[in-house]
Amino acid sequence: MNKILVFTDGGARGNPGPAAIGVVIKTEHSEKIGEISKRIGETTNNFAEYTAVLEALTWLIKNKHNISWSPDDNIQFFLDSKIVVNQLNGLFKVKNGKLRELLMQVRILEQEVGVSVNYQLIPREKNWQADILVNRALDEE
């Protein structure tokens, strides 16, 4: 069984304000196989967090042929946003219409990936690689 580890982060300076995402995708042996760092315009922290998950899932689908998938495989997402993790895990309701729309897009992409997808909350200091990518994108002018 393969396990793909995906570290995602999103941030906005001002909330809402200039926003960016950071994604680091690794094998279960900590080999980095993908990275995303980009600005996403003016939005909120939570919107950026969801966008990072969407971008990661899209990357995984586009690069599926480079990863030997089997039905037993697992994609483990790690985020430092408690509210977003709990919403993705179905523990919290999504009241904001825009975020609910993003959650529906996540569910569609999860199906397209075709393997089990899990979301786990981690401390911010353990998500430093994705956080660096967010700040790098925000610092680029």
Image: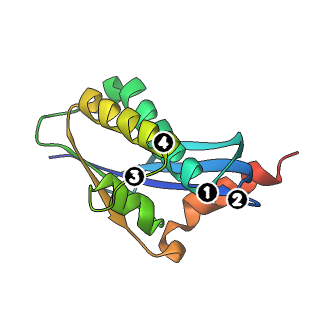
Q: Residue furthest right?
A: 141
Colour mapping? rainbow
Which-is-in-front pick, marks 1 and 3?
3
Graded by Cα atoms within 10 Å as few (under 14), some (14 to 19) or many (20 or more), the crowding at tag 4 reads: few
Which-is-in-front pick, marks 4 and 1?
4
Question: What amino acid is found at the position of numbered circle 4 in the picture?
Answer: Gly
For mark 3, what is the residue?
A: 94
Question: What amino acid is found at the position of numbered circle 2 in the picture?
Answer: Asn
How far is mark 4 from mark 3, CA to CA? Answer: 8 Å
- Left or right of residue 116, residue 60 in this image: right
Counting residues from the N terminus, which is met first, the one under dot 1 or under dot 3?
A: 1
Taking the image as drawn, is residue 34 in sight?
no
Q: Is residue 105 above or below residue 35?
A: above
Which-is-in-front pick, marks 4 and 2?
4
Counting residues from the N terminus, which is met first, the one under dot 3 or under dot 2?
A: 2
Residue at point 37%, 28% (across, down):
61
For mark 2, what is the residue?
A: 15
Counting residues from the N terminus, which is met first, the one under dot 4 or under dot 2?
A: 2
Question: What amino acid is found at the position of numbered circle 1 in the picture?
Answer: Asn
Graded by Cα atoms within 10 Å as few (under 14), some (14 to 19) or many (20 or more), the crowding at tag 3 reads: some
Q: Position of residue 22 (x, y in %)?
A: 59, 50
Residue at point 41%, 24% (across, down):
62
For mark 4, what is the residue?
A: 97
User: 86 and 2: which one is in front?
Assistant: 86
Figure disc tally: 4
Secondary structure of residue under mark 1: helix
How far is mark 4 from mark 1, CA to CA? Answer: 15 Å
Q: Position of residue 30 (x, y in %)?
A: 39, 57
User: 12 and 117: which one is in front?
Assistant: 12
How far is mark 1 from mark 3, CA to CA? Answer: 15 Å
For mark 1, what is the residue?
A: 45
